[in-house]
Image: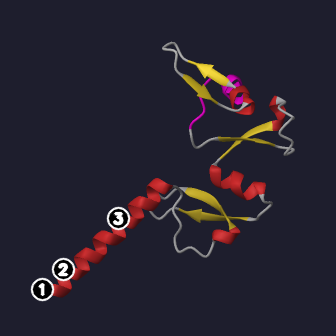
Amino acid sequence: MILFDHKGGRKNITYARYLMSVKLGRFLEPGEHVCHVDRDIKNCALDNLVIMSPQENAGRKKGETMKDFVCPVCGKEFQLAARHSHRVNPACSRQCGRRKGLAKQRARKLMAMRMGK
């Protein structure tokens, strides 16, 4: 489905995403995925559509079991596919992952500076 704004710009979205936006009366956030409960993408009945996070959607698609985690950066609770549970302190998003990586780099530099003195 193609949506046009008042300036003539356009945006492509799926029909299911469009229906959910109309139902909620707002545009969906980039981190909100619209999923079909019965996994039949041709069944776009409103009672068959649900909003999920990308992590929930990824695990659901493959029938994987999900594990609960707490983000070490922001403290938010989130789920991740069990196959990713080997990661040490996984972050809830790329943004938090970058923050966690930057914090590690800063700590290493600080340790190197202290060792050098």
Residue named by callout 1: 117
- For label 2, the SS is helix
Q: Looking at the figure, which quarter contains the N terminus? A: top right
Q: Tell which circle, 1 or 3, labels the residue nearer the N-terminal end.
A: 3
Q: Which residue is mark 2?
A: 113
Residue 109 magenta-drawn?
Answer: no
Q: Which residues are magenta?
A: 20-29
Tell me which amino acid carries mark 3: Leu
Q: Please report contact status of discs 2 and 1: CB closer than 8 Å, yes or no.
A: yes
Q: Residues within 10 Å of mark 3 (few under 14, many from 20)?
A: few
Which residue is located at x 70 percent, y 55 percent? 58
3D distance between C-alphas at marks 2 and 1: 6 Å
Looking at numbered disc 1 in the image, what kind of residue is underneath it?
A: Lys
Quarter of the view holding residue 49: top right
Q: Is residue 48 above or below residue 22?
A: below
User: Residue shown at 54%/58% (left/top)?
Assistant: 92
Q: Nearer the viewer, residue 11 or 90?
A: 11
- Give 8 or 68, whichever is nearer the viewer: 8
Residue to which mark 3 is pinned: 102
Q: Quadrant of the C terminus?
A: bottom left
| Picture layout, residue 97 above or below residue 51 | below
